[in-house]
Image (cartoon, helix red, strand yellow):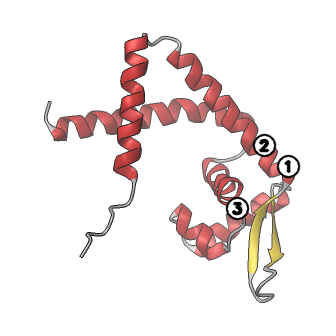
Amino acid sequence: MSKDDLAQQLHSVAIHLLRRLRRTDDQMGLSGPRASALSVLVFGGPTSLAQLAKAEQVKPPTMARLVDALEQAGLARREADKTDLRAVRIRATPRGRKLLLEGRARRLRQLTQMLEGATSAEQAALATAVSTLQRLLQPPTPPKD
């Protein structure tokens, strides 16, 4: 199989896997963009609106609307930055954290159920593939002089 064919198949499988897992996200009652922004806050910690927009690859006005909705739902809050009182940080609330972690647990349970249908050899192959993908996703190290 060529690298191009492998890339196409990997792309297709990744999209199908994410779509299947995303179905469990409906139970959170959040749109995909809201769940994604909340995930950044839960796993990445408090951040500025600009940094959150950059992480989610959206414009700041779009992110401001998403944060407004998360705040109205009691899932996130804006607060003054303790080191720069002019700056505002966005933080997940305990309720937002709980909701997101419960959603993540549902996705992991679904993945675990899917893996039960794989043989030991297939599970080992997947473990190797995961390690390879993790390595490939690492930023390149600069060459040493």
Residue where numbered disc 1 is placed: 95
Q: Are marks 1 and 3 in contact (CB under 8 Å)?
A: no
Q: Give the answer, above or below, for where 87 lies relative to 42.
A: below
Residue where numbered disc 2 is placed: 99
Q: Residue at x 58, y 17 (%)?
A: 113
Q: Amino acid at mark 2?
A: Leu
Give the left or right position of residue 123, taking residue 11 as reference: right
Residue 29, visible in the rendered structure: no
Q: Residues within 10 Å of mark 2 (few under 14, many from 20)?
A: some
Q: Quadrant of residue 123?
A: top left
Alpha carbon separation for disc pair 2 and 1: 6 Å
Q: Give the answer, above or below, for where 71 lies relative to 135.
A: below
Mark 1 lies on a secondary structure that is helix
Q: Amino acid at mark 3?
A: Gly
Q: Are marks 2 and 1 in contact (CB under 8 Å)?
A: yes
Q: Amino acid at mark 1?
A: Arg
- Rendering coords of residue 129 (x, y %): 36, 32
Q: Residue at x 60, y 24 (%)?
A: 110
Mark 3 lies on a secondary structure that is loop
Camera-nearest residue between 41 and 65 = 41
Task: Name the quarter where the C terminus is drawn.
Answer: bottom left
Residue where numbered disc 3 is placed: 45
- Rendering coords of residue 124 (x, y %): 40, 21
Q: Give the answer, above or below, for where 123 lies relative to 47.
A: above
Residue ranking furthest to the front: 145
Give the left or right position of residue 27, taking residue 8 as reference: right
Give the left or right position of residue 129, taking residue 145 as reference: right
- Rendering coords of residue 47 (x, y %): 68, 70
